[in-house]
Amino acid sequence: MSDQPSAILKTTGLVVGYKKELRETPLFEPLNLQLHAGELVCFMGSNGIGKTTLIKTLAGIQKPLQGEIQCLETGALVLTDRITSALLTVRDLVTYGRYPFLNWNLSLSKKDEELIEFAIQKVRLENLAHKRLAELSDGQLQMAMIAKALAQDTHLLLLDEPTAHLDLNNRVEIMNLLRDLARIHAKTILVATHELDLALQTADTIWLATPDQKIITGIPEDLVLNGSFDEVFQFKGFDLKTGRMMHTPYRNISIRLEGSGYEYLWTKNALERNGYEINKKGIIRVWIQDAKYFLDNEVFETLHALLKALNSKNHQPL
């Protein structure tokens, strides 16, 4: 985007992969990528394509095969590796984020203490700060790891699958936190993730790894509309442009559905899921009014009751 600030991180001809003896195995074509201040970038692609390897290479943990990485800021890295020191408390873990910056006697300064408190508060772990890591849920532990990275007070955050194995509520919370850090605190964030639905709603930019060893970049909406996501993930029975599963109208009955808002959308979903076709010229009229569902001269309080009545009229079980 032309109005973006200068890049915090920039790669030139970067080749990442593995080297065994004299044999090199590159995972992508030479990469020319950029990360900008205040930007949340989601790095996506099929499993095993090399997302973790690129994250580790950008973080300096793994050497590139070729090319350059120019980084104006030091970065903090959050991996999915399990923590073995389960007796540590949350505060202990977050405090370790300050250790690289301490003087020779390892004493915390007032600034260190303030950064630790900021990190704990930002991820809303105040009530858990005294808890041992072994007592935390997976979601709480992941938030603690992010707090540790925040305590380092870097402008660049690199995260590898921070929402892996978490439930929906925790996944949403973490992605909202990352978006907040980018928007409000001008953090530059790159997160490797497989959470397509959340990435489409939170990311400023997508890095999309393709099967032919390229990484294409763009805003989420462009990559949806130009078919890039469909090409990479090859969705089966899912229409990404509408965000819906594709249902087959197996009942061969069309319904003229009238209504508005989220009630209309969920009624449409229920009818299509049960094999009905929604058509403006449908032979059966169903309408929604005042959170109630109408069919002929009958009124129903729930969608389940409406479906039972429809299926009864057409002699088909729910």
Image: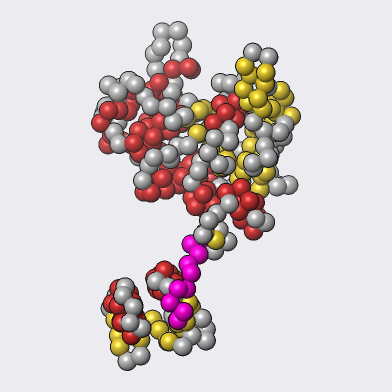
**How is the structure coloured here?**
secondary structure
Give the image quarter of residue 213: top right
Horizontally, residue 54 falls left or right of residue 181, namely: right
Task: Tell me where residue 163 appears, x and y as whole percent.
Answer: 43, 40
196 shown above or below 271: above
Task: Tell me where residue 220 appears, x and y as whole percent.
Answer: 60, 52
Q: What residue is rendered at 40% in x and 83% in y? A: 287
As drawn, the residue found furthest toward the bottom would be 297
Specify whether residue 294 is in view: no
Pick the front one: 194 or 96:
194
Q: What residue is rendered at 45% in x and 15% in y? A: 102
Task: Tell me where residue 211 appears, x and y as whole percent.
Answer: 64, 41
Pick the front one: 156 or 192:
192
Give the image quarter of residue 216: top right
Asked if residue 245 lies in the magenta stretch, the reply is yes
3 shown above or below 316: above
Q: What residue is rendered at 46% in x and 88% in y? A: 283
In the rendered image, the quadrant that contains the C terminus is: bottom left
Pick the front one: 164 or 172:
164
Task: Tell me where residue 147 appears, x and y as whole percent.
Answer: 41, 32
- Number of residue marks: 0
Asked if residue 254 lies in the magenta stretch, the reply is no
Q: What residue is rendered at 61% in x and 38% in y? A: 37
Q: Which secondary structure class fits the magenta region best? A: loop
Pick the front one: 258 or 38:
258
Horizontally, residue 207 falls left or right of residue 147, namely: right
Specify whether residue 213 is in view: yes
Q: What stretch is highlighted in magenta?
A: 243-253
Give the image quarter of residue 291: bottom left
